[in-house]
Amino acid sequence: MGAQSNGPPIIIKKKRVSGGDSHHGGAWKVAYADFVTAMMAFFMLMWLLNATTEKQRKGLADYFSPTIPINPVSGGGDGAFGGDNMFTEKTMVMDGSGATNRNPTEAKRARGSTGVDSRGGGRDALEDFSSLQAQLLGRSGESLVSKKVFEHIVTRVTDEGLIVELFDTDEESLFDSGTATPTQMMRALVFLIARSSDLVTNSIAIEGHVQASPVVLSNNPSWVLSTSRAQVIRQMLEDKGVQVSRLERVTGHADRKLAVENPMAARNNRIEIVFLRDP
């Protein structure tokens, strides 16, 4: 028999070193995803360059790198999308006015939108009605009234000022037939105009028009009716907060100034509210 050792038993630990299977990690997947995304963007760019015109490419470039005007005497660029700027030389913030007041753009001159300022000034003071028109035509994004109201309103800029027409349609009238009693639709329109009129401080004229009667009458009621309707609108505007000092004149034109060729058409029943330029 061999000699028996009294020493402690010897324990041998084998340490397994990993590393040969590092390809099972997830870091390479992130890098590969980034590479695929970059290649997709590259091929998309190549396709766009080949499939678009120069103007379209310029529009895309402008979309991803918008220009924000910060010049204190600038109101943005030219055209319908001239931009907004809080730092113009105007006393009130207006939308889409474009360019500087001292140097009006050709687009502003072409649409006849110069010649009025926030104080109702003369032709040397340049201010346009663009924000007021946008509000009245429902383009400002603020929902003051239902969309159906905008079917009864049109605007146009003339030498006299901004004319806002409120008119009957074949489906709905703004006054009860043959009277000066306004309907709910007319009340909604007057509410819209009273709220929007705060965007400018120009004087206001109110003009009433009615359609022609189907027969010739010895005592034509259209004069009284058109004047009465204009007076009702004046009173409604005052009740809604429009300053009395801004209301310069109230006129009834009977059926003498037709909006359409047919003298008896409902479209001729209308109220014109004019934001006046000062002479």
Image (spheres, helix red, strand yellow):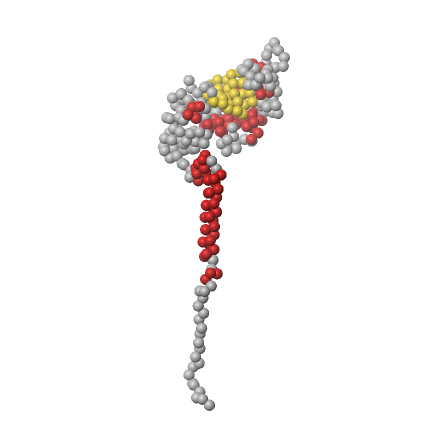
Q: Nearer the viewer, residue 161 or 39?
A: 39
Outermost residue on the front side: it is: 50
| Image x and y of residue 235, in percent | 52, 22
Q: Nearer the viewer, residue 224 or 51?
A: 51
Choose top left, top right, bottom left or bottom right for residue 213: top right
Outermost residue on the top side: it is: 218
**Is residue 92 found left or right of 170 in the rendered image?**
left
Can residue 123 be seen in this snapshot? yes
| Image x and y of residue 36, in percent | 47, 50
Can residue 228 be seen in this snapshot? no
Where the C terminus falls, by quadrant? top left
| Image x and y of residue 197, in percent | 47, 26
**Is residue 276 found left or right of 220 in the rendered image?**
left
Eyeballing the image, is 22 above or below 51? below
Task: Tell me which residue sits at (47%, 60%) in the image.
Answer: 23
Q: How many badges with numbers are in the image?
A: 0
Q: Nearer the viewer, residue 106 or 126?
A: 106
Task: Tell me which residue sits at (52%, 31%) in the image.
Answer: 144
| Image x and y of residue 123, in percent | 40, 21
Task: Tell me which residue sits at (37%, 29%) in the image.
Answer: 89
Eyeballing the image, is 176 above or below 11? above
Task: Tell me which residue sits at (48%, 17%) in the image.
Answer: 249
Outermost residue on the right side: it is: 215
